Amino acid sequence: MSDHLIAPVAAHEPPYYAVVFTSLRTEDDNGYGETAERMGELVKEVPGFLGEDSAQTPGGLAITVAYFRDEAAIEEWRNHLEHRAAKTYGREHWYERYSIHIAKVEHSHGFVRERKQAWEQEQESEWEQEWA
């Protein structure tokens, strides 16, 4: 089990780019998880990589959105030797079909719910006990 926080990638100052990779996999799973993990490590080394979000439907449609500061960063990732080899292997074994869309992000904002401070929770608890 992963120990990282599950959260969307934070909003960044535009402009930047979103690379949307949508795929449907084959039944062949041989080495996919290890390769995906390795690609996730390697892309973080690309200057200009901002983060990625991923999701999968119960039916198997997977979507990964990777965010990059500029087109040069996308090009560096696209041409990375290990990534190129993984893409070739993926087309031969892991993917039934996929599509890639690259979009320029011109507006970005986010929201994070503020967590209550411990003393606020204590006060609420005391108030609830008084009125219970």
Image (cartoon, grey):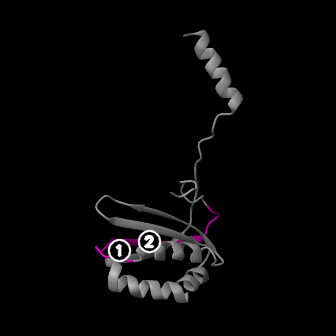
Mark 1, secondary structure of its residue:
loop
Mark 2, secondary structure of its residue:
helix
Q: Amino acid at mark 2?
A: Gly
Q: Nearer the viewer, residue 31 or 83?
A: 31
Tell me the residue at 58%/85% (across/down).
76
Tell me the residue at 54%/89% (across/down).
81
Discs 2, 1 touching: Cβ within 8 Å: yes
Q: Amino acid at mark 1?
A: Asp
Give yes or no for residue 57 being in the magenta stretch. no
Image x and y of residue 85, in percent: 46, 88
Residue 33: image tag: 2
Give, as a single range, the part of the protein colored magenta.
Answer: 12-30
Residue 61 drawn above or below residue 98 = above
Give yes or no for residue 15 being in the magenta stretch. yes
Image x and y of residue 64, in percent: 45, 68
Q: Residues within 10 Å of mark 1 (few under 14, many from 20)?
A: few
The quadrant of the image that shows the C terminus is top right
Residue 29: image tag: 1
Image x and y of residue 129, in percent: 59, 13
Q: Nearer the viewer, residue 120 or 34?
A: 34
Residue furthest to the right in view is 119
Q: Nearer the viewer, residue 29 or 120?
A: 29
Image x and y of residue 96, in percent: 29, 77
Disc 2 from disc 1: Cα separation: 8 Å
Residue 105 drawn above or below residue 118 = below
Left or right of 25 in this view: 130: right
